[in-house]
Amino acid sequence: MKSLLQTIQSSEEGHVAVGHFNIANLEMLKAITEISAELELSVIIGVSEGEREYVGVRQSVDLIKSYNEEYADRDGVRFFLNADHTHSLEKVEEAARAGFDAVLFDGGKLPFDENIFQTKRAVEIAKSANPDVLVEGELGYIGGSSKLLDEIPEGAEIKDDDLTTPEEAAQFIKETGVDMLAPAVGNLHGMFKNAPNPRLNIQRIRDIKKAVLMPLVLHGGSGIADEDFQEGIKAGISIVHISTEIRRAWREGFDKALGENKEEIAPYKLTPAALGAIKGVVRNRLKLFNNLL
Ligand SMILES: [Zn+2]
């Protein structure tokens, strides 16, 4: 079976991207794994600090292991586990030890030098806990949480000055030793309720890719225009994160089921609508990232 790094590399060769989907419960995990198997595409399952506090660190690892055993031989797909947005070195170590395939140390809000210092420590700690774990660094601030937004959060309007520069990116990866980089290229966590998200700066993605020659990760994929995804992947994005769209699908599916079945109390009779809505999101996004539309 291919490792995560090999999976990313073969996506790069095919000019496509690996989908990264966040989970907080079983509906999300079931929907993502089923669509991944249906399309025969390996995916990354992400759990942020908040999500793994709920699902459990060890439990996340065991769940993914179990789904891998279920699907890997039959469908040739693999599910990889990423400790998304990890803010402390203790939690980096915890995830690496527990058997995560990747860890994102999120120093995006820190001043540049402090981000380098802390991320370098995160790489050392993660690799000493598990030499095979991939470490991602974040450079440039791309907003806070995966939620529905009315407008760009105050003080978070995206200006060209806020985007990661190729020079900073090159220095950052050289000094920290990260395996993957999450740059700020016009993307933002969360998605707008009634409007598309801001446009990506495709030229900046191309310039950063040229400067670092390593996998680039696009966070805050929810709400980005299809065309921007396609151009962004061509320009050098290797992994795309989708979270808010899944959360919204879960909520809308559940609301519908609860509204239509007021007396029903069996959870598994209420979850199919949420599962179906999440599957729709994952199928569309994976097809788009893999030129299958
Ligand atoms: Zn993110």
Image (tube, rainbow, N blue to C red):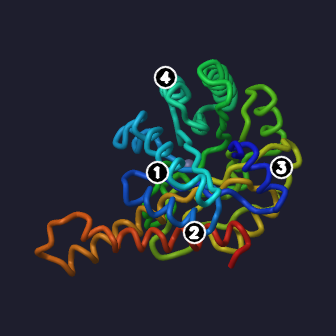
In this rendering, is residue 58 above or below 263? above
Dot 2 amino acid type: Glu
Residue 90 numbered mark, or none: 4
Q: How packed is label 1: few (under 14 Cα within 10 Å), some, or many (20 or more)?
A: some
- The disc, 4 or 2, on the residue closer to the chain's N-terminal end is 2
Dot 1 amino acid type: Ser
Classify mark 1: helix, strand or loop. Answer: loop
Dot 3 amino acid type: Lys
Q: Tell me where residue 115 appears, x and y as whole percent.
A: 64, 29
Number of labelled discs? 4
- The disc, 4 or 3, on the residue closer to the chain's N-terminal end is 4
Left/right of residue 149 with respect to residue 202 in the rendered view:
left
Q: Outermost residue, front direction?
A: 74
Q: Are marks 3 and 1 in contact (CB under 8 Å)?
A: no
Residue at the location (48% across, 65% down)? 245
Question: Looking at this view, is 285 or 88 the one in front?
Answer: 285
User: Distance from label 3 to label 1 (Cα)?
Assistant: 26 Å
Depth-wise, is mark 1 or mark 4 nearer the camera?
4
Left/right of residue 25 with respect to residue 84 in the rendered view:
left
Q: Circle 2 sits on which residue?
A: 38
Classify mark 4: helix, strand or loop. Answer: helix
Q: Tell me where residue 203 appears, x and y as whole percent.
A: 83, 60
Q: Quadrant of residue 18?
A: bottom right
Question: Looking at this view, is 128 or 201 the one in front?
Answer: 128
Residue 272 visible at all: yes
Question: Looking at this view, is 269 or 286 the one in front?
Answer: 269
Question: Looking at this view, is 218 or 277 the one in front?
Answer: 277
